Amino acid sequence: MYDDSFMRRAIEISERALTEPGTEPFGAVVVRDGRIVGEGLNRSLADLDPTSHGETEAIRNACRALGTVDLRGCDLYTSCEPCAMCVATMNIAGIANLYYAADMGHAADALGGLPESARFPIDALYLRHECGRPVETRDMPAEQSHADEAAAILHRWAETRRPA
């Protein structure tokens, strides 16, 4: 169930980008059982990490705090509608509900005219489209090799985790 105090905290975290070098104004919190268990701010430029979005940082923080990668039952509040990478991360972690403030249109309107040197350039709508396509139809060229060798390792690893 939505709680305004958690959204206000996500927005408050995003505001830190006004004074913290190398950050961008995207903040998020992960909530479990009515309390914040993880927080994150986009630190892509500061950490030289293109995956360091507010949502992924909040998820990483929550996983470390809870000692698990299973965030089923947790909610995520974010200051801006998440990109496809963050949505995928939320699904992998098991986030139950997403609550967001600004949407993609707000972000495009605010950030669209900035030079690339002032921001980490992401075309979120293109990313959403590209990620949903089969690998052979994506714009990025891709080539498969050594499939059998890599698949054999996957099978061997899985066998070590099967109950006897």
Image: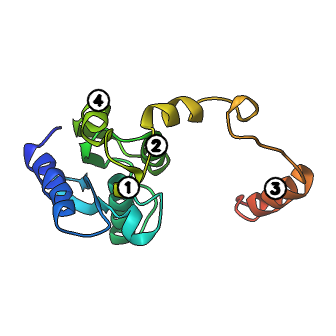
Q: Residue 32 at x, y = what percent?
A: 25, 54
At a point 46% along the width and 60% down the height, the residue shown is 69
Q: Amino acid at mark 3?
A: His
On the image, which quarter does residue 132 sit in? top right
Q: Residue 60 at x, y = what percent?
A: 40, 63
Look at discs 1 and 2 and give the one toward the viewer: 1
Q: Residues within 10 Å of mark 3 (few under 14, many from 20)?
A: few
Q: Is residue 109 above or below residue 149?
A: above
Q: Residues within 10 Å of mark 4 (few under 14, many from 20)?
A: few
Q: Earlier in the sequence, mark 3 or mark 4?
A: 4
**Which residue corresponds to mark 2?**
91
Q: Give the Cα separation between the discs numbered 3 and 1.
A: 33 Å
Q: Amino acid at mark 2?
A: Asn
SS under mark 3:
helix
Q: Earlier in the sequence, mark 3 or mark 1?
A: 1
The tag on residue 53 is 1
**Which residue corresponds to mark 4?**
105
Q: Would you say the residues marked 3 and 4 are in contact, meaning their CB atoms lie under 8 Å apart?
A: no
**Which residue corresponds to mark 3?**
155
